Amino acid sequence: MLTAARIIQEALRTGKTALSEHDSKRLLSAYGLPVVRETLVRDPGKARAAAAELGYPVALKACDAGLTHKTEHGLVELDIAGAAQLDRATTRLRSRAPAGAGLLLQEMVPGRRELIVGLLRDPGLGPVVMLGLGGIFAEVLADVSFRLAPLTAADTADMANELAGSKLLGPVRGMPAVDREALAAWLIGIGEIGLQHPEIQQLDVNPLIVRDGQHAGQLVAVDALIVLAPEAVPGAETESVRHDRPTRITGPTARVRREQAPLPVARGSLEPLFAPRSIAVIGASATPGKAGYEVLRNLEAQGYTGTVHPVNPRGGEILGRRVIAAIADLPAGVDLAVIVLPASSTPQAVRELGRRGVKAVILAAGGFAEAGDSGLALQTELEQAIQEAGVRALGPNTAGHVSTPSRCATSFFSLGQVRRGPVSYIAQTGNFATHTLRYILTSEHFGVARVVGVGNKIDIDESEVLEYLAADPETQVICAYLESLRQPRRFLEAARAVTPHKPLVMLKGGATAAGAQAAAAHTAALATDDRVLDGVLRQAGVVRIHEYSQLITAAKGLASMPLPQGNRVGFAAPSGGMLVCLSDLCRRDLNLEVPELAETTRQRLQDLSPPLVRLRNPVDIWPAVSQHGLERAYGEATEALLGDPNTDAVVIILMLVEQTGFPCLEFLVELAGRQADKPLYVSCSGDQPLMAAAKAYLEPRGVPTFSRIEEPFRVLDIAWRCRQAQLRAGQEQPRSRATTRELQ
């Protein structure tokens, strides 16, 4: 917009770091966004004439570039009813206002509801748009939602619905609903302003009044502030959008810090990492327990069929493989090298491997940037070595990776054979390719496709791994634990591309309320790390979780069952107390409904129980078990709930005790297979050995079983949010069950 560009250029030319309220609203008007009628005046006579034209009552404000929080400084006079009152207000404001400030005369807009919309230019993400409840208490209420520009109409609807006070946007106490199309136009328009004018660092419209009276429900800007960056070049493209200078979102206390993250020179495929035909282990050892031995043993445990080259100056033989004495003696063109040398020796090893034509390296050693200044200098040397060698690098400070389709595991932690399955993990912690994976292998029954410990992300980062997994036919579910995003915008774009097709569940470590800037604009003060992150992840279809254990329980549920078509859950339990508590959990803490059942379903359940027990959803199964036995009671109840048109998913809580014996649970496997469009989750109550036996029977047959009765409901909530992400993307991507047995 030429008018908007001229306003910005004139302000920058005169050394201003912000636009006046009047110029801010002129810029908004240039984008067709409705603003209050107003006139800039300098003396009482012009003020009276302007007021007569606008019509009383009017408001009068001091107006100057960078003049903020005017109400707190007594620089606003409201509800001025006549000329004499206007003269007195003019005199008061001229005595209080800074020298050279003008006076802004405005119509009084009738409206009892106030919103705030704004923009913040995040150094890692670019322009981020905010919506919230506004007025003078905007920062106290802190009821806000964020999205990354550009926005869609669906994004704006999600933002409005996420507000705790979203009901205020509907018809309330005789007031009509807010014009949602007008609100969408505001949010989309502000996003466009941010994209087209990188000089704008912050933008506030507060209040954005919801009109009463003749134009009830419409929106009009009554006050606005635009903050500029003096060093910005008009028309320049933002670094975060270009992606050629990546930044990191870091936790726990940093906002979004502009950190120079080195870009790799070699942008080769990740196939040498995930499907290596040959692997060299630099620092191989014959001593069990040492990293160089465990890497070799893990490759052996997977049944890796490619060529393995142990490298150690001592030579000899390790695990039946001839040891090569030096990197220089390796055959040319090895796909992947795992370096388990000390940090100080790693850069030279990378250079030597580059001379042998190695395509990718895994850097296990710690002691680099995470270790302070001395480690940072060593990491800089390592970065240079990687660029000189032209290799792809994972790490440093990584526990390695797993790629079960290639029968490859490079962790220095003894894993044993890793089950193949549909889940892939991106992990910014050594835990995952070590003891967390061991827990999955020994306590759960689902399998993995890829597990990647990104470490310090000196080259390969989470965005590139996500792009690989998006196209990977072996990966059906993606789970991530990340403490930082090296290229935030690229990661979100990759996520937006994958989530219509594959669930993406993410735990962000280091999440805090930190990061809000002490700034003139309310938007900057409200834009904490967590609030912004929540908004942009939802926008990209990423389902955010907050418990480490959910990286396992969610993966188990998503790997075995289809996503639900809706959020209506039918469930049965052997205890009225459980039914009450679980119903409360669904309605209070989770986005799940407990629906009424169809009458035919209800009657079928009623026929199972004594006449005095009235059955409905949720189902108290204990009377039926007492009358008909566990298998018949649970079998018919499960079949009825799965077949009911009002349910989208079913949870069964089995009662397993020694007195009743261990039942044949094949009926659950058979019913799950028959009703393939609804997820069936199982939990248990009773004797622990029988609960473990039920899990051992059901899970390898594709029915996920959880140890705590709340877990299946929490996983179902995650699954429903994944499904919602697909629905928002306008994609129908139903996924059939794929058990671990079928994938092996």
Image (spheres, rainbow, N blue to C red):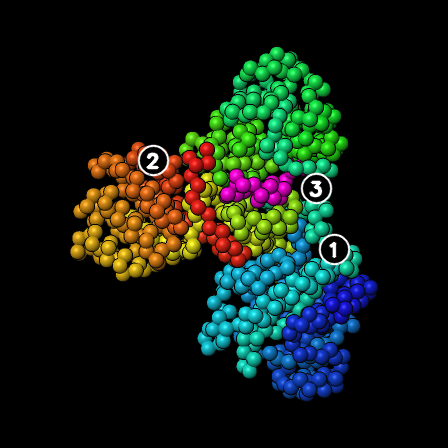
Q: Residue at x 46, y 47 (%)?
A: 735
Q: Which residue is mark 1?
A: 237
Where is residue 635? Give x, y as percent: 27, 46
Q: Is residue 32 magenta?
A: no
Instruction: Check disc 2 and give the amino acid type.
Output: Tyr
Regarding mark 1 in the picture, which secondary structure is present there? loop
The amino acid beneath tag 3 is Ala
Q: Which residue is mark 2?
A: 697
**Mark 2 and mark 1: span between their CA atoms?**
58 Å
Of callouts 1 and 3, the N-terminal one? 1
Residue 624 — which label? Answer: none
Q: In which quadrant of the rendered view does residue 737 lie?
A: top left
Q: Which residues are magenta?
A: 455-484
| Circles 1 and 3 in contact, beta carbons < 8 Å | no
Q: Which mark is residue 261?
A: 3
In the picture, residue 214 is in which quadrant?
Answer: bottom right
